[in-house]
Amino acid sequence: MKRSAEQGQLKSKTRQPQPVISEEMKAWSTALEGETASWPRITERSFFGFTALYRGDKMFGCLPRTRNLEVANTIAFKLHSRSPKVEKQLQCDSRISSFEKEKSRWFTFLLSSDADLHGALEWLSVSYEAAAKHRKTK
């Protein structure tokens, strides 16, 4: 039986397995979730092994619960818009990577120690504020 070109393409587009997160990352996610829970207009929803963070109807962050996107010790945050100052901060922070370099709205932040929790919380805060500004301009 011959395989069609379409079947071959489907097979080549299979996703890479998402890495399982460590107990340490679970603790970091729980800590970040606890810190953000008191922010105004924030809601949380389960989202494919993540806790999605929303400000109103705008998702601004993802904290891993069981699995992660690329690297096991990262959180993700979205910047709906960014100022030149924030753009420079993104470029200077070696713990950050983006899904699409210049056009990306989604970024990951790599945690490697408890000390990185402060930086992760700062980026979630920037993302949270950007979600509010995006809402006002729409």
Image: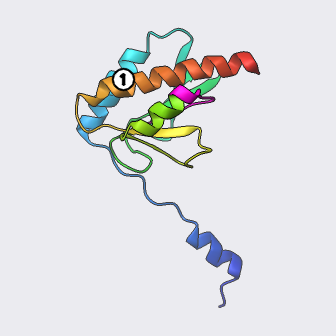
Relative to 17, does residue 1 appear above or below in the rendering? below
Residue closest to the eye, 2 or 76: 76
What element does badge 1 sit on?
helix
* Residue 36 horizontal/vertical position (percent): 43, 17
Q: Name the residue under label 1.
A: 32
Horizontal arrangement in the rendering, residue 135 relative to residue 131 (left or right) = right
Instruction: Tell me: 56 left or right of 45.
Output: right
Q: Is residue 73 left or right of residue 96?
A: left
Q: In which image quadrant can residue 34 be found?
A: top left
**Residue 118, located in which quarter of the rendered image?**
top left
Q: Nearer the viewer, residue 28 or 122?
A: 122
Tell me if residue 128 comes above or below residue 97 in the rendering. above
Marker count (numbered): 1
User: What amino acid is at disc 1?
Assistant: Leu
Q: Position of residue 19 (x, y in %)?
A: 36, 51
Relative to 48, residue 114 above or below: above
* Residue farthest bottom in this picture: 1
Disc 1 packing (10 Å; few <14; some 14–19; many ≥20): some
Which of the two residues, 133 or 60, is positioned nearer the viewer here?
A: 133
Q: Is residue 68 magenta?
A: no
Colour theme = rainbow
Which image quarter is the N terminus in? Answer: bottom right
Identify which residue is drawn at 38% across, 36% down.
65
Give how far across and how far down residue 131 sits, in percent. Answer: 61, 22
Q: Quadrant of residue 96?
A: top left
Q: Is residue 51 visible from the viewing direction of this image?
A: no
| Residue at position x 45%, y 31% in the image | 89
Which residues are drawn in magenta? 75-85
Q: Residue at the spot x=62%, y=17% of the render?
A: 132
**Position in image of residue 99 (x %, y %):** 53, 48
